Image (spheres, rainbow, N blue to C red):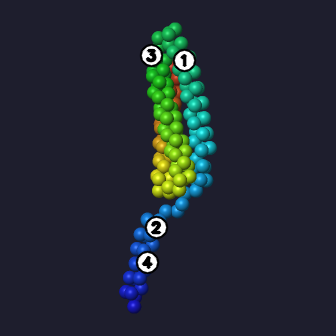
Amino acid sequence: MRVRKKNETLQHVRTFHSSSIITMSPLSFNTPGLLFPAISLLMLAYTNRFLGLANLARQLIAKFQEKRDPDTLSQIQNLRFRLSLIRYTQSIGILSLLSCTSCLTVLAFDLQKTAWFLFGLALLFLVASLCICLVEIHLSVRALDIEIHTLDKTD
C-alpha cells in the first residue's frame, strides 16, 4: 500500500512538472509596459552622466594643452574609456527599449511565445546595460584616485 502511494505521488509530480513546462501564462500589455518608465529614466541618467563627463573631458583637454601633465593625460584617457562605456550602456538600453516595443507589437497579434522571448530579451539587455554602468561607476573611483594622487604630488 505504501509503494502504491509513492508511485501515485511520483506520477502526479511528473504530470505537474511536464505540464508547467509546456504551458506559459499569457503575457499582458501591462508587464512589458512597466519597463518603459524604468528604461526611460535610465536613459536620462546615462545621458546626464555622458554630458557631465564630456564637459569634464573638454576642460581637462584645455588644461592639458596649457600644461602637459601626465596625470591630466591619464585622467583624459580614463574619461575617454568611461565615455565609451556610457555610449555602450545607452546603445544596449535602446536595444532594450526596442525589444520592449517589439514585444508590445507582437502582443497585439497574440503571439505569446514570441512576446515572451522579446520580453526576456528586453530584460536581458536592461541587465547588461546596468552591468556596464556598474563597471563605469567603479572606474569613476579610479579617476578620483588619479586626482588625489595629483593633490598629493603638489603637497
CA–CA distance in space, label 2 to label 3:
61 Å
Q: Which residue is mark 1?
A: 58
CA–CA distance in space, label 3 to label 1:
16 Å
Amino acid type at circle 4 is His
The answer to whether 111 appears left or right of 45 in the picture is: left
- Mark 2 touching mark 3, by CB under 8 A? no
CA–CA distance in space, label 4 to label 2:
12 Å
Residue under the image location 53 percent in, 12 percent down: 62
Residue under the image location 46 percent in, 67 percent down: 20
Residue under the image location 62 percent in, 44 percent down: 37
Amino acid type at circle 1 is Arg
Mark toward the start of the polypeptide (2 vs 1): 2
Mark toward the start of the polypeptide (4 vs 2): 4
In the figure, 23 relative to 1: above or below?
A: above
Q: Which mark is residue 12?
A: 4
**Residue closer to the observer: 144 or 57:** 57
Q: Which residue is mark 2?
A: 20
Tell me the element at label 2: helix
Q: Which mark is residue 70?
A: 3
Mark in the foreground, 2 or 1:
2
Q: In the displayed orientation, state which residue is furthest to the top.
A: 66
Q: Point out residue 71 in the picture as x, y percentages from the top left corner.
A: 47, 18
Q: Point out residue 63 in the picture as x, y percentages from the top left corner.
A: 53, 13
Label 2, residues with CA under 10 Å away: few <14, some 14-19, many ≥20: few
